[in-house]
Amino acid sequence: MKLKQHLASAGSTYFSAYCIVAAFGTYFCMYAFRKPFTAATYDGIELLGIGYKTVLVISQVLGYTISKFLGIKFVSEAEPHRRSIMILMLIGIAQAALLLFAIVPPPYNFVCLFINGLPLGMVFGLVLGFLEGRKMTELLTAGLCASFILSGGAVKSVGQWLILQDITDFWMPFLTGLIFVPVLLLSVWMLHQIPPPDTEDQTLRSQRAPSRKEDRRIVMAKHGMGLTMLVFSYMLLTVIRSLRDDFGVEIWSQLGFNEKPEVFTQSELIVTWIVVIVNGAVFLVKDNRTAFYTAITAIGAGFALTLLAVFLFWQRMLGPFAFMVTAGVGLYVPYVAYHTTLFERMIAVFRERTNLAHLMYLADSFGYLGYVLVLLIRNFAKWEINYLNLFLGCLICIGCVALLLTVYSFFYFRRQIVAHQQATAVQLSSNSV
């Protein structure tokens, strides 16, 4: 309680640093329970003629996707005082599933990764709830989002290191999670000490409360078309971002980086710094409308950058490492902008009774559903897969379509904001009379 009171009266720099460390640490550790299995290749094992790693990825992502749909209700309705214990319970279930993954023999243990993904999809929204609705939210959530950029590579490095120590592919994920348990407990405790948004935060960004069914219905009735375009764009973005993350080992290998686990961390560290600086700086923009437009523009620019990266790579003007970093920046600037600014400022502009968990889980659920469909279509079509070519093709197709959707969304919401301002002005005028 004393720490919470101290944080409530602390300066912005100290408070922001504390929140970023707590949120970053919590979600970084969550990845240690979700992604380490992707560091292995599971060569020589198949299920129904499908490579076992692909089976595992589909199984976990399917559970993770269902979790996102559940999160639309359960995370957006979660009471603030229950978030910390919910985080620990969900990750505890995921770790128990990894233990079963090590014990149950293949190919039957793929079910364990479905169970592993089922609770983990709800962790992000619970962590985000501690940070939203504040004048520094973009900076805080950029620090949080740095965790899922950097942690994917770092966890793979730890996983590959354990494999090099003769740990089996099936015990490696559980042991990786075990390594991160102490840091997880400390980080969640730190999260629990963060005080709620103060009066100034609520004035600048609107009050955030649990979002009930009727609240969610009203938001969709008002902004359904624009949200549909943003969600579809995010779905495409999630497909290519997840492809890069889950099959990074294969893509890097085909680029010529074999048995170099440090390359994951090195590349993602560069991407992280660039993306965090770009997205985190938006908190300096005080006007919610301007910041909202800035977020949509940054999303469009990110898609354009991915197209440029592919072109330069094909022209041999970018080397493999520089290409992966540039493509990573182009993908993660939009991805993080959704989390840090887009929905945060949208809520603040329209003053809707909702929260970030509602809108982010709406986007995330369809995002991961799209990725599951791509994985299923790709495997049951019996195509010979070259992951590098698949990645390049997706960058081009998804980049073009998502860029068009983003442009449409910009003009749609510009009309809505103008109409909202006019309605607000009329209401203020009538009240003054």
Image (spheres, grey):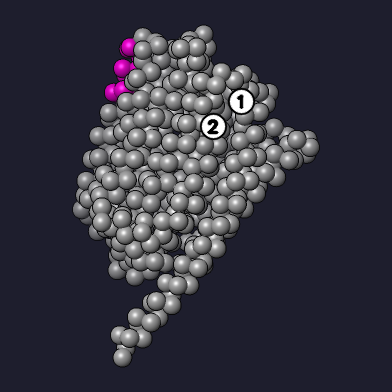
Q: Nearer the viewer, residue 59 or 344?
A: 59
What residue is shown at x 61% (from left), y 25% (from top)?
387
Q: Secondary structure at mark 2?
A: helix
Amino acid on which disc 2 is placed: Leu
Quadrant placement of the C terminus: bottom left
Q: Nearer the viewer, residue 207 or 33?
A: 207
Q: Which residues are magenta?
A: 96-104
75, above or below 115, in the image: below
Q: Position of residue 60 (x, y in %)?
A: 40, 27
Asked if labels 2 and 1 touch by Cβ distance under 8 angstroms, the answer is yes
Q: Main secondary structure of the magenta part?
A: helix
Dot 1, crowdedness within 10 Å: few (<14), some or many (≥20)?
Answer: some
What residue is shown at x 31% (from left), y 33% (from top)?
119
Residue ranking furthest to the bottom: 433
Upstream in the sequence, badge 1 or badge 2? 2
Dot 2, crowdedness within 10 Å: few (<14), some or many (≥20)?
Answer: some
What residue is shown at x 66% (from left), y 28% (from top)?
389
Q: Position of residue 394 (x, y in %)?
A: 61, 36
Residue that mark 2 sits on: 243
Residue that mark 1 sits on: 387
Q: Does residue 159 show up?
A: no
Q: Position of residue 110 (x, y in %)?
A: 38, 18
Amino acid on which disc 1 is placed: Tyr
Q: Going by the image, does 189 lie left or right of 132?
A: left
